[in-house]
Amino acid sequence: MPELPEVESVRRIMERVLKGRRIAKAEVVPDDIMQFGQNPLTIQEALEGKLVTAVGRHGKYWWLELEEKPWLYGHLGMSGWIRELGAPTMRLKEHGNAPLDDETGRPRFLKLLLETEEGGRIAFTDGRRLGRMWLSSDPTQDDRLTKLGPDAYTALPELDALIAILKKRKAPLKALLLDQGLFAGVGNWIADETLYHARLSPKRLGSSLTPQEVAQLRKALVDVLDHAVRVDADYEQFPEDWLFHHRWGGSKGTEFIDGKQIVREPVGGRTTAWVPEIQL
């Protein structure tokens, strides 16, 4: 599932191709589920001919700021993706090796295609239809975004504030990290990677952490996000000692990392990969 680094990566792609340019053509493929029932023609009319002034992101949500409102908002869901057509693109693990385009060159599972006056093209695709896009006003007024807490990459609470927050929480660390009201943008793999590097059990209650352990947790989260964002979420450029390369079940993963057993079990309502021998 695309998490904060992946969404930041596509935000940068859209910013590079669209910011400061006018949308000459917008193709919005009808999909009541993905568009929350909004009329695709209404979305198309809101986009065509408009100048893109900025591309924003908060947590796992992204949006296009236009010269006038409404603006377009989106979420990649479980396996949605945004790419510049004609340019190299990263692939999510969920995409496997299936072709991205059909035999005519049209993006498979296309939901949105934007073309600028200069000819740059951006495609939003989603085979599982779990992504979303909709028109709304300012991010400070959109119900989905106002429920989010601080962005884990751009606005992570400082150490003293984080100590105070976790001291009051009697939920497992895994559940707390996945709480978008606390750590907007953190998803399953980031949470597992952070806890692995912090050497903390996902089952530990937030209130049980010492100030030093909170510092370990915060540093691990910062380090993981910094690196993942720096390499545009390209997992092939993640360090070899990261749990990411081993955490997946079945043929995609392994049973051990550095000679220590990986346990996969539900924690905080989500499948969790962790190493009990070193995560205490």
Image (cartoon, rainbow, N blue to C red):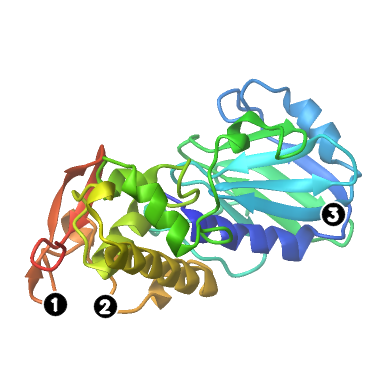
Q: Is 269 above or below relative to 184?
A: above
Left or right, 37 with reference to 210:
right
Q: Is 78 above or below relative to 198?
A: above
Q: Which residue is mark 2?
A: 241
Q: Which residue is mark 1?
A: 258
Distance in Å between CA atoms under marks 1 and 3: 47 Å
Q: Residue 97 is drawn in which quadrant?
A: bottom left
- Residue under the point 91% across and 44% down: 49
Q: Earlier in the sequence, mark 1 or mark 3?
A: 3
Left or right, 232 with reference to 164:
right
Q: Residue 69 is drawn in which quadrant?
A: top right
Left or right, 212 with reference to 75:
left
Q: Residues within 10 Å of mark 3 (few under 14, many from 20)?
A: some
Q: Report the disc number at residue 53.
A: 3
Of residue 27 and residue 238, the one placed in the foreground of this image is: 238
Q: In the rendered structure, are the residues bearing label 2 and label 1 in contact, judged by CB atoms less than 8 Å apart?
A: yes
